[in-house]
Amino acid sequence: MPFEEDPAYLSKSRLKSDLVAHNVALPPAASKKEIYVELHLKHIDQRNAADFSSDEEDLVPDVADREEDPDHTEIPDPRTLTDDELKAALLHHGVKAGPIVGTTRAVYEKKLKKLLQPDESGKVNGAEKAVVYSDSEEEEEEEVEEEEQKADGEEEVEESVCTESEKQTAEQTDLAKQESSQAKLPYQNGSFPYLQCFMPSSRLHARPTSNRESKSKWNSRNAVKSSERSRSRCKEIPVGISRASSVDQHSGLGSGVPSGSQSVMSNGCSSFSSQAFSITQMVKEMESRSLISSSTDADRELNVSNVQEHRSQPIRPPQEPMKDIIKEIFPETGTTPTGIHATRRRPIKGAAQRPVQYGYPATPVSPATLERREMERRRVPIRIQILVFLIMACILYFIYVNLEDICVVLLDSLNQGFDSEDGYSLQAETEDTQVVSGQD
Amino acid sequence: MSSTSQKHKDFVAEPMGEKTVMALAGIGEVLGKRLEEKGFDKAYVVLGQFLVLKKDEELFRDWLKDTCGANVKQQGDCYGCLKEWCDAFL
């Protein structure tokens, strides 16, 4: 909101949205614009007004608290909220809070405070908690002023990235510098700086991290087309892409941003900021930059193997282990100017005038399969086996049934055969058979 | 992923029963004493707090830090320990 604007000059829908943004209950839909203006004046322009009447029925309890609390003219102090209100406020920020009991209340209050601050200033969560905790109240005041678009408040705030930067390009340098001093902390969070790279070139938004606030921050930044920050981050894209490991990218990018090279690199990058996002252009960018940077700063040599080294000092130690890991993984790779390493692919056999030089098997066959094929070739097929079995069974059955007759036939033939020989044994045999047949 | 300590493994191996707060991974003598002073004298009380915070990592870490002054590593160890215990037994 530009601070010059009088609520009376805002449209009704604009007033409505402003009221919603400030967590004020809207009057009935058919209300006149005057009512909206009134509410707007009362709730949003509180800081300006020394005193205002509190006779409207739509006054939210938070507002009353805000009036009384000297420290937080704009933000409801979580301490003064009831459990239900605290829960509602957290829900408003998208945090599904659990039961607010004695032991959990403190935690949720702190969380709400944290959520309220980034809403106004676009502060990053995570590594900056220490900062938040140490000067939370003073910062809130300043951020409150900021929201009014007062130029005074901005410079005092440590991270002021939100809506002001959209409108006031003159402030960008200051903001960038302030941010660079502060930005070292957030960029220890690996995913964060990586995302900034893609800001100017596409509408890729932050990954769904727990930092919803960072999302709003990015949204506001997206509007900035020619900011130095975007340029400085733009330069990190080719570096990031050329590296195989994404982890390296994150840390490398993060350390690159606060290096304070923005003003230096802005000239070099300015020609590229408006270009489309393409790898070839980035490669060119890198090469051209390598020429520029070598002249300006020896550290900035964009030798890819030393990418991590020319990041800012504080970030350097964490980079070392990752750089070493990369070298371990790819020990043979030399350094190339573009940092792109490509391994030669095995040529496709038989394609594109490349004759088949060695005989590849038509289909890859495992030794077990080969064995099995051999075996099956030599085995008798199963059907034939079953057939033979049935035939044998039938034969045996017939023998069993016609045992007598068969025996008689056999003995006769034996008798004839052994007539000249031992007659006693034959006789014994005939007796046996007679006994056997008798039993049958 | 960092490897888990022996303390962690011991805690997660069985139901906590009446174990003291010092049996939690990341909680040593000093932190344990502070927790006990605040009323969290048994591991299950800290578990209770963990569950009331809906097993949320950030909230639990914040709470732990505020209550006994645990550093980031200790917070992480304790959170991991309780989380794994819950996965196994809850």
Image: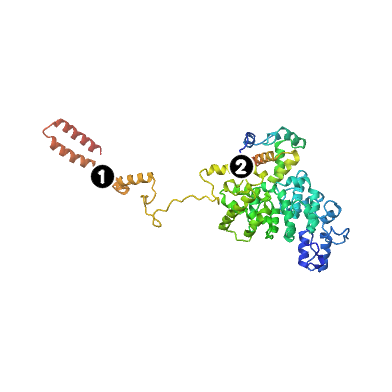
* Residue A185 image point, x, y percent: 70, 47
At 14% across and 31% down in the image, what residue appears?
A422
What chain is tagged by disc 2?
A
Chain letter of the residue beneath label 1 in the structure image: A
Tell me if A308 is positioned left or right of A365 in this view. Answer: right
**Kind of residue at badge 2:** Glu
Q: On screen, A163 above or below A126? A: below
Q: Quadrant of the C terminus of chain B?
A: top right
* Circle 2 residues within 10 Å: few <14, some 14–19, many ≥20: some
User: Farthest residue in the front direction?
Assistant: A295
Q: Nearer the viewer, residue A164 or A127?
A: A164
Image quadrant containing the N terminus of chain B: top right
Q: Which residue is mark 1?
A: A395
Residue lying at 22% horizontally and 35% vertically, measured from the top left: A435
Disc 1 vs disc 2: which is toward the camera? 2
Tell me which corner region of the image, top left, top right, bottom left or bottom right, holds residue B3: top right
Q: Relative to A62, is A396 above or below?
A: above
List the single residue furthest toward the left. A420
Q: Mark 1 vs mark 2: which is more N-terminal?
A: 2
Which of the pair A419/A196 is nearer the observer?
Answer: A196
Residue type beneath disc 1: Ile
Q: Whole-percent x and y of residue A356?
A: 37, 53
Q: CA distance from mark 1 to mark 2?
A: 87 Å
Residue A241 image position (x, y, % from top left): 58, 52
Q: Nearer the viewer, residue A19 or A356?
A: A356
Task: Check disc 1 and report its element: helix, strand or loop.
Answer: helix
Q: Is residue A205 visible?
A: no
Q: Secondary structure at mark 2?
A: helix
x and y percent of residue B38 in the render? 77, 37
Question: In which quadrant of the rendered view does residue A21 lie?
Answer: bottom right
Give the labeled residue for mark 2.
A320
